[in-house]
Amino acid sequence: MDRAALDFANLPFAYQNTDANIRFWYRNGAWSEGELTSETSISLHIAATCLHYGQEVFEGLKVFERPDGRLQTFRLFENARRIQRSAAKLLMQPFPEHLFREAVHRVVRANRRFVPPYGSGASLYVRPLLLGISAEVGVKPSHDYLFLIFVTPVGPYYKGGLTPVRLLVEEAIERATPGGVGDVKCGGNYAAGMRATIAAKEKGYAEVLYLDSREKKYLDESGSSNFYAIIGKRYVTPASPSILPSVTNLSVRQLAKDLDLAVEQRPVSVDELGSFTEAGCLGTAAVITPVEAITYRGKEFVYAKDGKAGPITTDLYRRLTAIQLGEAPDPYGWTEIIPEG
Ligand SMILES: Cc1ncc(COP(=O)(O)O)c(C=O)c1O
């Protein structure tokens, strides 16, 4: 295999064209067999429900090259199940789990030369997307659907990997509400939060931290990742009906238990900001990103000094990435080697 001529060690987190994407169509009550194509555009009806009524859900997962050169997925079935939940909530046709796995394997194999080499610090980001494509003008669900997956090689979401970032508690703008769709991965959630994120970036923060929309008292999550705090020997992460259940957070909760930390998933009040000893963001893209400081009502709470992540965050990061990269044994069966096909 000739690897693509890319500077893999310095990749940004950005779209990069590859050789192929894979598409499945749901028509007349059945999914098609899936076709690989190098075409990067799709042709949609101008009245498609994804365009007008937001029938659009997606996923994000990563594929890693192991030290032995084989490729592996990380907790793929969690993403397969999450997009089914997302689809069900938006009255969309769920895409079957076994086809999800097959689709990831096929599209990754077709783009083998774009998988960043082991040791580059980069990985192959896999982006599944489900769209309602029937023409409707009244508000109702589509009959027909397109499921597709594209892949793109990416570097760290926040520059510098384990480099601490600053967050701003957002009080005015709400991303999601209890009873809404904040717990599923649909495009509308990101549109709702974009103005908060961009404004925070302009002020020098990496992201915002949303509060629960009912009381504006409890920490929810960031625009693109879950949140945790370390309080002494406790790993504390918000329980909320309006946050996305993160696969990374699910995994790190287990790793925290392995480190003999007590794991608490519960409402986390802003009044506790002063008690955190460490804090971090969690996500497929963010991996574990240490939080240097959180600003709330003009007051800055500092958790990482001199640009260095705290010891527990560093340990969790090492354990997680060692499993993802195939450097350490995977006692939980989270990874799967992609057969060569
Ligand atoms: C809003 C939001 N929360 C949390 C996450 C983290 O989820 P995961 O760890 O499954 O990538 C993401 C990224 O997918 C996200 O977009």
Image: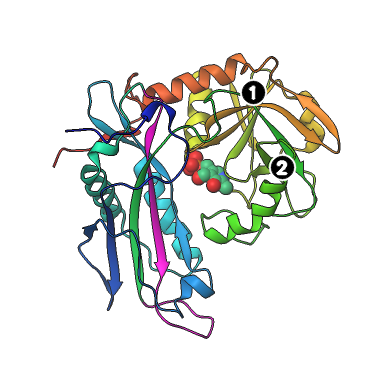
Whole-percent x, y for residue 126 in the image: 37, 45
Q: Is residue 94 above or below residue 173?
A: below
* Image quarter (top left, top right, bottom left or bottom right) of the C terminus: top left
Evaluate whether residue 123 shows in this view.
Answer: yes
Q: Residue furthest toward the left?
A: 341
Of residues 243 and 68, the one drawn nearer to the viewer in this rendering: 68
Secondary structure at badge 2 equals: helix
The local crowd at label 2, few if under 14, some if 14 to 19, many if 20 or more residues have their Cα within 10 Å, is few
Q: Is residue 257 visible?
A: no
**Res. 75 image quadrant:** top left
Residue at (68%, 41%) from the top-left corner? 201
Q: Is residue 129 magenta?
A: yes
- Residue nearer the viewer, 21 or 8: 8
Nearer-the-camera pick, 43 or 66: 43
Dot placed on the residue nearer the N-terminal end, 1 or 2 = 2
Return the x and y of residue 246 as percentages of the image width and height. 51, 42
**Residue 23 horizontal side relative to residue 153, left or right:** left
**Mark 2 residue type:** Glu
Circle number at residue 338? none
Please give left or right for residue 301 compared with residue 3 in the image. right
Which label sits on residue 234? Answer: 1
**What residue is at 78 percent from the left and 31 percent from the top?**
272
> Callout 1, which amino acid?
Arg
Question: Which residues make up the magenta segment?
Answer: 120-143
Point out which mark residue 202 bears: 2
Q: Are marks 1 and 2 in contact (CB under 8 Å)?
A: no
Compared to 131, does 107 lie above or below? above
- Secondary structure of the residue carrying tag 1 is strand
Q: Residue at x 53, y 85 (%)?
A: 138
